[in-house]
Each structure stands twice: as C-alpha cells, then as structure tokens.
Image: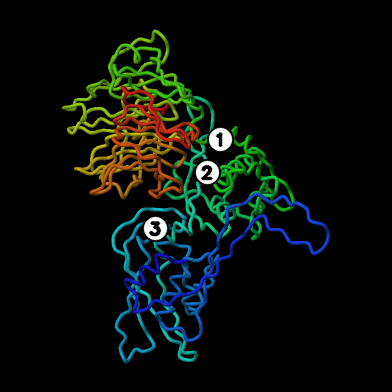
Amino acid sequence: MGADRKRAARRHGPGRAAAFAACGAVLLAGCASMPDSGDLRGVESTPRQEAQVRVFAVPPHEDASYSEIVTGFLEALTSDDPDYEIARKYLTPQASAKWHPLRSTTVLADGPGAQPDRLSREETDSLSYTLTGTRVATVDAEQSYAPADGDYRESMHLARDKKTRQWRIDVPPRGVVMGRSDFQRNYLSVDRYYFATGTGAGTAPHTAAVADPVYVRRNVDPVTEAVRSLLRGPTRWLDPVVRSSFPTGTALRASESLTPDDQNKLTVPLNGKAARVGVDKCREMAAQLLFTLQNLTPTMDEVELRAGDRQLCHLTAEDAEDIAVRGSVKRADYLYFLNDKHRLVRLAAATDDTEPTPVPGALGEDVQLGSAAVSRDEDMAAGVGLDGKNLYVGALVSGGPLGEPELTSAGPSAGKRLSAPSWDAQGDLWVADRDPGKPRLLLLKKGVDDPVEVKTPPGLEGRIESVRVAADGVRVALVVKDGEKSSLLIGRIERGDDGGAGDGSGVSVHELRSATPELEEVTAMSWAGDSRLVVVGREKDGVQTMRYVQVDGSTPEGPAPAALSGVKEITASEDARLPLVGYSEDGIVRLPSGAQWQKIVTDGTAPVYPG
C-alpha cells in the first residue's frame, strides 16, 4: 500500500518513515469445506476468478509521533476505506468536519514528500509540514480527469492536544493527494453515456450515445458509484452538447450496494423524481445505465428500473442498441487506402484479404491522391490531390464523374496545403487548410456545399495539421503544430452558432484540451473507441512510440499496441472487432486481435476506415 508514499518518504521524510501494516482481504472463489464423514467423492471446483485485493488503512496508535501521524495519514489516503474514516482519525474533529476528500484528487509523479518546518522550543505542540511533488493530473469534484504539470507544494499543520497529548492534523491538505502508481491501483476509468443533442448518426434517425469518462474508486463499490455518477449528469465540458434522460434530481433511493443477480440483471431503485417518467423515457434511462455499466461488467444483460414498489421499465442489452448507437451506426464494410498509383482502393474490412480493388467512381480511376476519406455510410469519398492543393468529392458508384475541386489551397507546398479530410456523423466533410498565410479549419455540408470556416477557440496557438471527427459527432481530435512541437487536442463541436444568419449553419469548436501532454511530437492519430484514440508520437528526447490515450489525457488500462517501426499513418475503427491498420516502412500492415503485425501490401499509403 502506498508504494509512491514509501519512495517519497525515503527521499524527503524526517529521518525514518514509520511503517504501517496493511490488511489485505483476498476474496477467493471456489472454496469448499471438508466433510468429516461419508465416502470420498469428486467435487467440481468453481472456475477460478480473478482475486480482488482490498487494502485497509491503520488508525494512529497511542502516542504516535508527529512524523508517524503524517505518514499514516498519507498512507490512509491510498487505502480502500470507503469514506476515509481511518484517514479522519489522524485529524482533529474540527479539521475532519471541514475536510472534503471527494472534492479533488491530486496525482503526483511519485508519492508526496513531507518536509517538517523547523520545530522551535516555544512551539513544541505545533508543527507545519510542506508536502511536495511533481503534478501529473487532477481529478475534480465531477470525477473528471485533467492532466497537470508543475510543482506541487501544500502546507499541512499539526497540533498536540493539551489534554491527551496526542498529535493530530488540524490543517490537512485540500482533498486527496497520492502518487501515480497508487492512483492507478485505486481508481478506474468508467465511460458514462449521455445522448448527443442536435445531431443524428448519419442519415438514419439514430440517437448517438456519447461517452463521458470519469474516475471512480476501483475497490469501493464501483458499480454503485458509477450509477450515482451517471445520475448526477455530464461533466461541465460535455454538458453543452449532450442530454440525460434522467429527470433532474433523480438519485438512488436506497444506500445499499447495487449488484447484478445471477442472471446478469441489475435492479436500480430510484427516488420519486423518476416515478412519473413514461415508458419511452424510462427505456432511454435504462440504455444509459446499460451502456455505462457494461464498462464494468461486460456480461450485464438487463437492467430494471424501479421507483417505490413499482417497476418503471426493464431493458435488455440487445434492445438498448435500438435506442441509441455507440460508435458508428454501420460497421465498416471496407478498409481503404491508396495504391502504388495513388488511386483509392479497398479491401473487405473483416477478412484476411490482401488483394485490393479500385473503388467505384472517379476517385478510383481518374486522379492521383495524397490522402482520402470515406463517409461513414460508405456512399461518398473525398480525396486531396497528390500536391495537397485540391479537394475532390465523389460518389462511390461506377461511372461517377470527377467534378471540379470543392476546395483549393494557396499554400506554398504540399505539406502546407490541405490536410487529410474527415467525415462526421452528419455526412459533413472536415479538412484543415495549412496555408501559413491563412490557416483555417473548414467544413463542407454534405461534402459538396461551399466551405464554411469552423470557429476555433480564441488564442489557439499553432496551425492545425490534421483533423478527425468522432463517430458521436460532438467531439473532434486535432493535431496542432506550434513551432517544433505538435499536440493532440480534443475539442467540443457546437452547431447552430451562425452569427445571426439564422440558418443554423454555424459550427464551432470549444475548449480544446490536450490528450497527449507527455508527447512533444504527434505523427499520426485515429479514434479507436468511444473515448479512446491511438496515437503515434515521440516524447522529448525519446523515440517514436504508439499508444492508446483517453480523450481526457489519461492512459487507458490494457496493453499498448505491438511495436511497429517507422509508422507514418495509423487508422482504427470505433468497432473494436476491426484490426488496427498502419502505414509504415513495411507498407500497409494490420494488427489483428491477439496477433502480431501482418503485411497487407508493400506499396500503399494513407489507410483509412470510414469516417
């Protein structure tokens, strides 16, 4: 417990850090008792389950020194104590009443160092400590993760009770503070789901479900906490573009823990705020719950919502997909890339085929391309010419003509002209003009209307190099280059801000935030899930790496993609069943689940899935 704390104590602690014993409760499945009579017979064992280890804090012992109080308190912050009751035992009653650990969590590179101020003879019953470290991230009261940097310095004060002569902390640090490895052990990222407002998913009247990642404590009833978090509503960042079907004020009726039954069904008791919802609204509420809880319990099949003694509705996982869509409405039929003649070709996406065929229409026959994108319904394609100057759009139908360019850049060279395009869920086309004299982010309605400049946040430093719109239609990933550094930024898409024109055509991007704070250079990126991207880049003074990142800048659990040298471009699908595909020094390669990289073709560039 508190591995980061122990390392920090050795570096910064006052002499010897006190060692506190921690109790680990290990839950073992498949235990059986031994009978004391009868004959011997075989017993079928329960399949082995993954052990769940919970770490408990230790309260202060009698006459603990001030250094032991400090060390014990910081260790208690990394335990699985649900309400931090043990940590509060290190505080004075007045300090405990004012301390709010759930309002913020500060994550440091290592555990916090604790350095005491000089203890004077006149102040033998009072002492201040300074907690130090290097910031990595914060988790706020909304449970939202945000990368952070810079030095951490926080004061903490102790006093010795005049009657009991026991040391206690009377000015604790704000919230909770711990090292990165303790945070990864204690916390779990969960995608809560809300519904996009003002957007559809392609041309079909589907509602898009949008993932809103938050962090909950891994071993402190995560299912119940995920439900509570969902009911509280979306984070401030996402709130302008999503809605929740739960009525305002809806909460869990009871305080007991929520646990699926042996049929993988969860019953959720709600308070009276939800008592009068209609069946359709209730089914939307149930879909939000199912999508959210399947992060934690992938086998969950059904939820039932109740208010009082009355069932409001129930919904199965299969029916939830008819209410809202996570990711793309349509599973990709094809993988697309440019062949050795710079023409757009395709392969069946879910096969091992290595023989591409030209796409139907002019983009597969009449023009040399440097990059391309295919609409999510796979009816349209867009391509940027080999010199980066012109953007062409055409239907993927045999005999489709190649019209005039929809957009032309005046940039001085190919790398300073048009980026690779990207189609959003509404069938609109996005592209960045990298002309140093007039850098712009542009949108073409349905891919063919006059280009409209997308408003970006004031003060955006650097030039947009590439753009990828999420399948939910409300988030966009941008690679922005500023000098020698390039960063991956995630923005919120808002529609209808038309500057008074009244036609609802205005589109703007708001509150860009970094998803790769540790990378100095981002070479390529693609959406690879509801809240995950795959990124190729390089840390300062480092070598090229490929990794998954969350939209909030955190690192998702699970292994990184297998190493691949010389990666120039990467593409992934929100559908996890489709392999990762890259363009490297070996040509076009793919990474099937559980396998190594496999070569598709030697001569090819710019692989893309629809989107």
Labelled disc at residue 324: 1
As drawn, the label of residue 138 is 3
Determine crowd level at label 3: few under 14, some 14-19, many 20+ residues with C-alpha closer than 10 A: many
Disc 1 or 2, which lies upstream in sequence? 2
Q: Could you classify mark 1 by the number of other residues whose Cα lies within 10 Å: few (under 14), some (14-19), or many (20 or more)?
A: many
In terms of depth relative to the viewer, which is nearer, 168 or 201? 168
Secondary structure of the residue carrying tag 3 is: strand
Residue type highlighted by circle 3: Thr
**Vertical position of residue 54 compared to residue 448: above or below:** below
Taking depth in this image into account, of 31 and 546 the one nearest to the observer is 31
Q: Is residue 325 above or below residue 40?
A: above
| Display coloring | rainbow
**Residue 503 in view:** no
- Location of residue 16 (image quadrant): bottom left
Element at label 2: strand
> Which residue sits furthest left?
412
User: Can you say whether 15 is above or below 604 in the image?
Assistant: below
* Residue 465, x across and y down, in percent: 27, 35
Estimate the x, y position of residue 518 in percent, counting from the top left: 31, 50
Badges 1 and 2: C-beta atoms under 8 Å apart? yes
Q: Which residue is mark 2?
A: 193
